[in-house]
Image: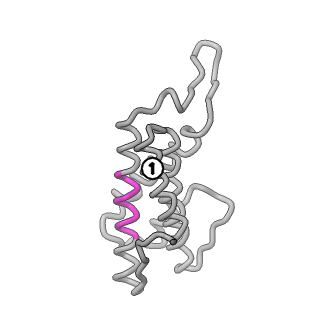
Amino acid sequence: MIEAQSDIRSAKLLLDGTEFSRSIYHSQQAVEKGMKASLVLAGIVITDDHWVSDRFMKAFPEMLNIHNLIRDSKYLERQAIKSRYPLFTSIEKPIWIPSNEYTVQDAEDAYRKALAILKSIKQFLKEKHGISFAEERRQ
């Protein structure tokens, strides 16, 4: 969760610095790491996969608003690779260059989704497992 919190702070800094594609990537990373940290409590350790939403839902089906959370998480998962690498699929289509394509609205949307997901995860872990996470930064 420490790394998830670092990624969400990075997403905000990158959003404020108009690096929208990189902000989206870090928003997704924050959610992925938050989910992976939670899954450990269910005995599920994932180190070699970035697609964790479905396993999170299976592990914590009782979580409040789980379907909305998973919908937004899956959206972020789809953006993870797309936000990092140019994409060339055919000669008829231009090359997708993430830094040129994503907008401030895209990055703000991803950041808001990530914040909401992390808040839900932290609330759930506090209520169900009595686990709290400090919000303060390292000095």
Q: Residue furthest front?
A: 139
Q: What kind of element bears circle 1?
A: helix
Whether residue 115 is in magenta: the answer is yes
Residue positioned 47% across, 65% down in the render:
5
Of the residues shown, which amino acid type is indicated by label 1?
A: Leu
Q: Residue furthest top?
A: 92
Left or right: where does residue 45 sit relative to residue 130?
Answer: right
Dividing the picture into quarters, in which one does residue 86 lie?
A: top right
Is disc 1 surrounded by few (<14), some (14 to 19) or many (20+) residues within 10 Å? some
Which scheme is used to colour this image of the protein? one colour
Q: Position of residue 109 (x, y in %)?
A: 35, 44
Q: Residue furthest bottom?
A: 130
**Chain part drawn in magenta:** 112-121
Residue positioned 51% across, 72% down in the render:
139
How many numbered marks have been drawn onto this rendered protein structure? 1
Left or right: where does residue 36 sit relative to residue 134?
Answer: right
Q: Position of residue 12 (x, y in %)?
A: 42, 51
Residue positioned 51% across, 27% down in the render:
100
Q: Which of 68 and 21 lies nearest the eye of the viewer? A: 21
Q: Position of residue 36 (x, y in %)?
A: 55, 68
Residue positioned 56% across, 26% down in the render:
96
Magenta-drawn stretch, dominant element (helix, strand or loop): helix
127 w.r.t. 91: above or below: below
Q: Position of residue 65 (x, y in %)?
A: 31, 64
User: Which residue matches tag 1?
Assistant: 13
